[in-house]
Image: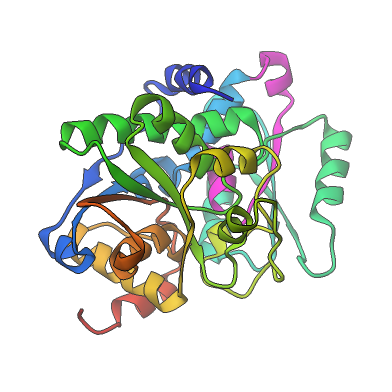
């Protein structure tokens, strides 16, 4: 994986993905204790950065292979990204989703025309189920993060960050990225290595599900003890990817972890001061920027809000929190 793969993905995404804005608020600057710039990927097609990787992967497939259809595993955002890309190409999409995935994400995926197959995380083998369906129907698997074409697509977000930060006069800063398996984080890190080496990527995760943070500290892949039990469902993965972790280990600074309450507070502040809707997993980088100032250096910090597909009940919880 290198910058040429990301540049090629950017060409395929032209006219299809949105160039999402880099937002700011003086109020949030005061809380963060420094200039804070927010890359609003919640405004991407399907409400998250995942559309970039999905389109990158599908657009690179041989047309005959693509016509047979694709399959993906996802709790929601990758599902919707793949479903939207498949619909645009007019090909079938089967999405294997956990039965406890947020209903808004399940409904959104079906609404994009995909066939949703639900499974029980505790009793069923997702990989075996997906492999069987792929073999029976001749479908191509689009992995959520441990796939070069997907990483390249997510890296296009990093190309935009490099350009937008330069336009804002920021050449040195930590770039906090909401991190699950590491597709977005590693893609952005590769893009910034080539285009803005003064910007250092740092993964942000929920407390108790900080496998990337612990893996970076240990220098080897560490697993999470649990696979559910946190509102940040979009970024709960068992461990970093085999492809993504070497990139993260080489390029990223120390990881950060935030509480559920801090993620909710960040969601409320994003809505109040940036006028954007963030889901919990998409708000952890903003939460780290706002509530972990001592762990960040420099006069500016950049963070991603990586998704906005939130259940109304969770969003109501965030909005009901007291003013900062």
Q: x and y percent of residue 91 in the render?
A: 64, 28
Quadrant position of residue 70: top right
Q: Residue at 37% across / 22% down in the picture?
A: 15
Instruction: Indicate whether 124 appears above or below 241.
Output: below
What coloring was used for the rendering?
rainbow
Q: Is residue 87 visible?
A: no
Residue 114 or 311: which is nearer the viewer?
A: 311
Instruction: Indicate whether 126 appears above or below 13.
Output: below
Quadrant position of residue 261: bottom left
Q: x and y percent of residue 156 in the render?
A: 42, 30
The number of discs equals: 0
Q: x and y percent of residue 318 in the render?
A: 35, 76
> What span is colored magenta in the figure?
61-87
Looking at the rendered image, the quarter that the N terminus falls into is top right
Looking at the rendered image, the quarter that the C terminus falls into is bottom left
Residue 71 magenta-highlighted: yes
Residue 278 or 173: which is nearer the viewer?
A: 173
Q: Is residue 194 left or right of residue 134?
A: left
Residue 214 or 310: which is nearer the viewer?
A: 214
Q: x and y percent of residue 268 in the render?
A: 28, 70
Q: Is residue 252 visible?
A: yes
Q: Residue at 71% across / 30% down in the picture?
A: 69
């Amino acid at each position: 994986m290198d910058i040429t793969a990301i540049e090629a993905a950017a060409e395929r995404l032209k006219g299809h993905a949105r160039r999402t804005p880099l937002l700011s608020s003086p109020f949030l600057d005061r809380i963060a204790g420094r200039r804070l710039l927010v890359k609003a990927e919640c405004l991407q097609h399907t409400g998250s950065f995942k559309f970039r990787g999905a389109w990158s992967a599908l657009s690179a497939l041989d047309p005959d292979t693509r016509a047979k259809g694709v399959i993906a595993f996802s709790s929601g955002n990758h599902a919707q990204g793949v479903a939207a890309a498949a619909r645009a190409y007019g090909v079938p999409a089967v999405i294997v989703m956990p039965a406890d995935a947020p209903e808004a994400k399940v409904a959104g995926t079906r609404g994009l025309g995909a066939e949703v197959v639900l499974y029980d995380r505790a009793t069923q083998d997702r990989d075996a189920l997906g492999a069987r369906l792929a073999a029976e129907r001749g479908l191509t698997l689009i992995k959520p993060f441990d796939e070069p074409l997907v990483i390249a697509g997510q890296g296009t977000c990093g190309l935009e960050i490099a350009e937008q930060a330069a336009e804002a006069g920021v050449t040195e800063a930590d770039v906090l990225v909401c991190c699950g398996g590491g597709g977005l984080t590693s893609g952005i890190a590769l893009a910034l290595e080539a285009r803005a080496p003064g910007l250092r990527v740092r993964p942000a995760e929920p407390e108790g599900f900080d496998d990337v943070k612990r893996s970076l500290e240990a220098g080897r892949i560490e697993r999470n003890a649990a696979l559910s039990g946190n509102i940040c469902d979009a970024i709960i993965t068992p461990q970093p990817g085999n492809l993504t972790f070497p990139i993260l280990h080489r390029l990223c600074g120390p990881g950060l972890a935030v509480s559920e309450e801090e993620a909710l507070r960040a969601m409320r502040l994003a809505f109040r001061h940036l006028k954007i809707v963030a889901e919990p997993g998409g708000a952890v980088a903003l939460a780290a920027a706002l509530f972990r100032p001592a762990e960040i250096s420099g006069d500016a910090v950049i963070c991603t809000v990586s998704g906005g597909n939130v259940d109304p009940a969770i969003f109501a919880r965030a909005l009901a929190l007291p003013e900062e």
